[in-house]
Amino acid sequence: MTSLIALLILVFAMVVGIPIPLAFILSAAYMCLTGGYNPVMLFTYGFNVQNTILLLTIPLFVLAGAIIDKGGLGEKMIETLRKFSKGSAAALGTTTIVACALFGAVSGSATATTSCIGSIMTPRLKDAGYKPGHIGALLASSGVLGIMIPPSILMILYAWGTGTSVLACFLATIVPGIILVVLFSLVNVYILKHDKTPASPMAEKHLEDMLASAQEKEKERLIKQDNKKAWPALLMPVLLLGSIYGGILTATEGAAFSVLYSLVIGAAYYRRINFKTFRAALVQAGETAGVIMIMLFTVSILSRMYMTENLPNLILNGLTSISSNRVVILLMVNVFMIIIGMLMDDCSGTTLCGPILLPVVAAMGITPIQFAAILSVNIGMGNTTPPTAPLLYLGGRIADAEVKDMLKPTMLLIVFGWLPTLLLTTFIPSLSLFLPKLFGYV
């Protein structure tokens, strides 16, 4: 009962707007007062569990994302992908979605992906006739691909909290991530077809210029030149993922490689990184990583107390008292994770739900690797689901859109994108286990 009350205190604290680390501490303080826990031992435990080289991966990937953003690599990726749109507004939306997946493959962060890709693509999408609400919703859902396409900070946290293989977790989210890319692209075409504004004069002129035969040869030359400039940026995900899955580098070493590669290319090739921009990237990465590490410290203490109080069994007994049907129980677990994703940021939700709910779903026959994929889809959907939806509000700020204008496209993306992917990932194990089996992790 103590752990359930503490969980309710945690949820209530987040609903009223208390910062998440403080909400964790408040819940832990209640358990200390009522359960007789020694705070000194809890703080010692919190420091000890963070004493692992695996967590060094997080600040390194955050730093790599900041350098990519400021070093021009992300912009070159997008410009190369945009060449394939050939003036099509629908293809430009697909380019945005794929660019988010590629950027996520080297940054591992949904927030960094949404911010970087959104700032570059928003003007182009508006010129192509996209409404601000449509853009904000598309950026929010596509930005979550940054936590679905490996390497993912969330999967590192999940592996750390549950003792699962990091690489197996990376592989488990790839197929669900690809399914999301396809479904988002289809939903985007539907929204654009039924809710499109006239293209701006700038966009019309751009399309006319592309069709002008007198400039075709010059355009082809420029495209080839841009592609040549873009190849180091496009090569980065290939080298990073190839070295990790090929066994050449560990996840932590891969994170260090991504920092070094992006720094060298950004400074020597694109000449966008200097002392000032590098310092700004360090500050940005330091702030983000600092918040994550403080959150990990507090949530690790609280998770330990929940496990001591046998909260997973209490949750399982509560669910089975409602229904003994496996499908119903898994649906209720998914609803719980979606609510957590709505209330917390992605890192907090993953770190809290992983160790607590894994024993619950394991009793239903779900393996830790499959649950990694289920959790990532749930947390991603929760982060874009109103009323809280932290990533949705970020996408709205970038697109300069009001929340009410984003509700309709967001719900379409949820109903026809997120929910089908979640159901497929939950009830068809092979979607998330195929690649881990292929690489020998299952």
Image (cartoon, helix red, strand yellow):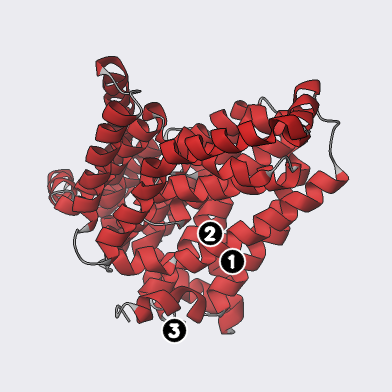
Q: Between marks 1 and 3, how big is the CA–CA gap?
A: 17 Å
The secondary structure type at the circle numbered 1 is helix
Q: Nearer the viewer, residue 157 or 362?
A: 157
- Give the side of residue 69 with respect to residue 322, left or right: left
Sequence-wise, the earlier of marks 2 and 1 is 2
| Residue topped by disc 2 | 378
Amino acid type shown at disc 1: Leu
Circles 2 and 1: CB atoms closer than 8 Å: yes
Q: Amino acid at mark 2?
A: Asn
Q: Nearer the viewer, residue 47 or 404?
A: 404
Percent x, y of residue 224: 52, 40
Q: Which residue is mark 1?
A: 422
Quickly name the residue at label 3: 365
The mark lying in front, picked from 1 and 3, is 1
SS at circle 3:
loop
Q: For the view shown, which residue lies furthest in the top direction?
A: 276
* Residue at 27% in and 28% down: 268
- Which of the marked residues, 3 or 2, is nearer the chain's N terminus? 3
